[in-house]
Image: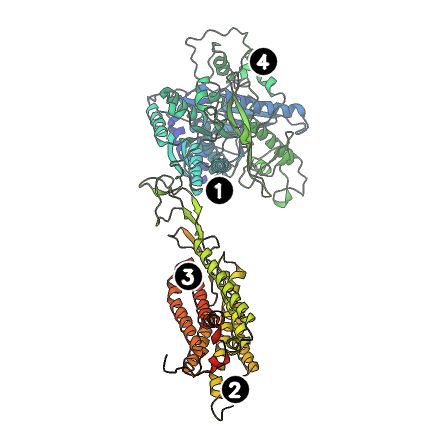
Amino acid sequence: MTFSGMRSLEFNLSKRRTKPVLLSLLWCVIFPFNSNQDQSQQCKLIPGSMALPVLEKKGDIILGGLFSLHDMVVEPTLPFTSSPPPEQCTRFNFRTFRWMQTMIFAIEEINRDGKLLPNITLGYRIYDSCSTPHQALKAAMELVGSEKSSGVEGETQSKGTCHETVPAVIGDGGSTQSLVVARFLGVFHVPQVSYFSSCACLSDKNEFPAFLRTMPSDFFQVDALVQLVKHFGWTWVGVIAGDDAYGLGGANIFANEVRKLGACIALHEVIPKNRAQTTIASIVSKIRSSGARVILVFAVEQDAAALFAEALRHDLEELTGIQWLASEAWSTAAVLSTPKKHHHILQGSMGFAIRRAHIPGLQDFLLHLHPSSPDAPADPFLIPFWEEMFQCSLGVQAEGQEHNVEGKPPCSGAEELGSVTNIYSDVSQLRISYNVHKAVYTIAHALKAMRSCVKGNGPFPQQACPDVDNIQPWQLLHYIKLVEYLNFFGDEIKFDENGDPAAMYDLVNWQLRPDGEMDFVTIGKFDETTTGGKQKLQIQEHIIVWNGNQTKIPLSVCSRLCPPGTRKAIRPNFPICCHDCVICTADAIECVRCLPEFWSNTERTACIPKQVEFLSYSSTMGIIMMAISLFGSFCTCVVAFIFSCHRATPIVRANNSELSFLLLFSLTLCFLCSLTFIGRPTEWSCMLRHTAFGITFVLCISCVLGKTIVVLMAFKATLPGKNVIKWFGPAQQKVIITFCTLIQVIICTVWLVVAPPTPHQLMPRKSILVILLCDEGSPVAFALVLGYIGLLACLCLVLAFLARKLPDNFNEARLITFSMLIFCAVWIAFVPAYISSPGKYSTATEVFAILASSYGLLGCIFAPKCYIILLRPEKNTWKHLMSKAATDKF
């Protein structure tokens, strides 16, 4: 096949909806097949096509292998006048060479042990895909119909007969290469088990029915990275992606998931595959100007190396403090950690890496390689490996490999791999190598299951078992999907419905050792299979070393949190994470409002408790009113004492001394009930103050009413033919007082049961005060209490006014009339004053009304009597009291 034809084939296979029929037709054109022909004459390659270098070993069952042993291909100039020269692969990769050797080690380990596949020898056929899709496709085509060698094992020729299709392929590493290979192999249902392809797109079984992998999908890696960003509170994150399926797919998923958390993407750039210096320099400049302190590089190690090399060329101090997040493709890459020039940039980097394991015997196997060994001539990849490792020339050019010996001395033959320390011989971070090891053993376990099938209990129609002497790839694919075993490293190996393994990652932190070498320290883990409410991501923060050898978590935000007293103002044409901070105003919705009982300080940085306002005993007004109340009750007690000492005198006995003493008692209660209005309102004080006020005042007015009726009836009884005084004797007076008071008691009882007064906080938003009041509970009940008192007072006033001109030198009705006038005037003025008074002044208004009306009653009714008793005793006689008084006044 010509080079241009191969590129065309790659293009068709790269389409997302490649038709299997077209691929089948294409396959028949390339490898015409006739079932009647002898196998030796099947599948002739198109004349002029070049076979690829292959590392091959015979066996009963041959496993295919694809490894990107070189990082790129030097494409020749096509003259279109002659056959194109072979493509040259360049930049040998020691890490991938170790992966290939791990596959060989695992196969030889299985053959040597003999327990897993007794009497069966596994062989291999391994190709170099050179990190390019079309090379990987060419290798895959040779694996399903490659030329049979006509000479020594391992030698390759351009002509010959075709091998039969390998039953399974291990590889490729890169997701971009695996996409092309998986579409091709899927048409023929040849199982492909990748060890490093993590693109989430490969989980689509409609497109890739024969693809499986021992590498977790990027979907889970992105989930782990998003959880990491969430854990540390980073809201301004940059994303740099490689220009391939792995980088673009993973970076896009990450960006979408991070936005769902409410974080923002500071920049989203792509490293081109040609790694043009100007483009990468532009990316570095954007990183510097973005302000992001956390940057995720979702790319293969070659692309990441190009980015950091450009960053070093600029030597930007701003990049030193950036916290780099690594995707698993380069999170433990020695190509980045080994050169000490990268240390001051990458120190403290953090990323997820797949689980590692120690494979016994692998290091000795890796070090036994030597060009002089018997197997060396069969290994076309050993020559470039050896020459690159020791920087010497063996004088032999391997087919399909770049051979540049300019400036290299000849190899002496004394070179030993044990004397060199590099990524090839370093087995401390066996992660991808472990995946290769698992891929080989997974296929081996599937082969074992096929050979252990019992007829009549098989997985195929009519419970048939496969022919173990003629294994078909589609049958092996079925068994690989069903594989489930516990390997000798303690890990359970199985695939889900998408052909993906369970996702488990180590969180590694790049830390410098005292000797200046970089160490990958495991600081946490992510286990997607975690259940039972446990956290998938577990981190040991105390052992993390951040970029710049810091121990404090770096802050990566577009805008810092607004300080107290300010609010966010969104910047136009910027992501939502970017904002300015402006001073909080009263109408700002975004500002955190203080609770109603708190008030913002002058700096608007904190909420401080508002001043609590109520009529307290310690306030000036409270002290004055308490003193007036106590003085009033003291005066009342003094009057009662005077009356008690002169209770036999005419002026005391003239107007029913029992009513006088009861009235004095009720007045004392009226003075004292005002004290319940002073102090911090509580549930009990609120109920007590209104009910005590209502009942004591009704008792007081009832006594005055009784005295008024007695005065009125006493003078009516002196008229001829009138005998009404018997209906208003002491007993009847007590009944009147009890009945009037009982009505108020009933009103207050219903009030307390239905809607009792309760403490209430009045908290105006624009006031610095919290006003403590007693809420009436039921305004109707409160109005009934006051209304009933007013009704009795008005009735008393009317009766006293009617009796004001009755003849007697000491007509008590006049005194009652004056007292009722004062009482009514005070309470009529109280209503508007109470309604309009703010805060504690409404309570003070009520206390003032109680004290004023009480003093009015005490002064008007009892002061004249005390005056006569104490200062004018000559008038305290029956003769003086019974003398006629003028009736034309008042």
Report the front residue among 885 and 591: 885
Q: Residue at x 52, y 66 (%)?
A: 638
User: Looking at the picture, how far across and down is residue 637, in whole percent?
Assistant: 53, 66
Mark 4, secondary structure of its residue: loop
Residue designated by label 1:
206
Report the front residue among 846 and 884: 884
Q: Distance between the residues labelled 4 and 1?
A: 46 Å
User: Looking at the picture, how far across and down is residue 860, in whole percent?
Assistant: 44, 71
Amino acid beneath label 1: Asn
Earlier sequence position, callout 2 versus callout 3: 2
Mark 3, secondary structure of its residue: helix
Residue designated by label 3:
842
Neighbourhood count class around disc 4 (C-alpha, 10 Å): few under 14, some 14–19, many 20 upward: few
Which residue extends farthest bottom?
Answer: 721
Q: Is any atom of residue 25 visible in this view? A: no
Amino acid beneath label 3: Ser
Earlier sequence position, callout 2 versus callout 1: 1
Earlier sequence position, callout 3 versus callout 4: 4
289 is higher (above) or lower (below) than 703:
above
Instruction: Kindly report which numbered mark, 1 or 3, lies closer to the viewer in this rendering.
Output: 3
